[in-house]
Image (spheres, grey):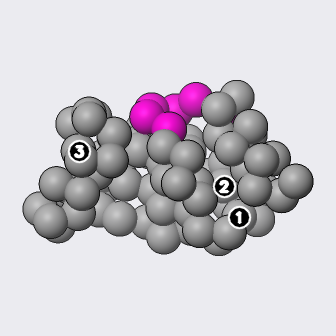
């Protein structure tokens, strides 16, 4: 499973998303777009959005803290 979380250190919704993944024991790559402009550009190309968090779960892109969408994307990977 390949999970990336595009986030910033000050974003409360990013923290919720990352805490949720940790709680589910899902390994993920945390990408700080405030410190990496190339990663920020990648995130915008991926999502069409400037807002964080953006999650990429095996190619399924989720914008924002959307627990239901995250659960569905994780379930699709495990199926």
Which residue is the extreme one toward the left? 37
Residue at image point 11% right, 62% down: 37
Any part of residue 11 in sight: no
Disc 2 to disc 3, how far (Cα)?
Answer: 22 Å
Q: Which quadrant would the N terminus be assigned to in this image?
A: bottom right
Whether 1 is drawn above or below 65: the answer is below
The residue beneath circle 2 is: 21
Start and end of the magenta stretch? Answer: 62-67
Q: Is residue 66 magenta?
A: yes
Whether 20 is drawn above or below 32: the answer is above
Residue 54 pos. (x, y %): 41, 44
Residue at image point 83% right, 58% down: 78
Say which element carries label 3.
helix
Q: Is residue 20 left or right of residue 11?
A: right
Q: Is residue 10 magenta?
A: no
Residue depth check, mark 3 versus mark 1: number of the one nearer the observer: 3
First along the sequence among labels 3 and 1: 1
Residue 9 pos. (x, y %): 32, 54
The residue beneath circle 3 is: 44
Mark 2 and mark 1 residues within 8 Å of each other at the beta carbon: yes
Residue 44 pos. (x, y %): 23, 44
Disc 3 to disc 1, how far (Cα)?
Answer: 24 Å
């Amino acid at each position: 499973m390949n999970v990336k979380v595009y986030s910033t250190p000050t974003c409360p919704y990013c923290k919720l998303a990352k805490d949720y993944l940790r709680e589910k024991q899902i390994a993920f790559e945390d990408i700080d777009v405030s410190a990496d402009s190339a990663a920020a550009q990648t995130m915008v190309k991926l999502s069409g959005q400037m807002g964080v968090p953006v999650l990429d779960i095996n190619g399924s892109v989720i914008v924002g803290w959307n627990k239901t969408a995250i659960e569905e994307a994780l379930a699709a990977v495990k199926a």
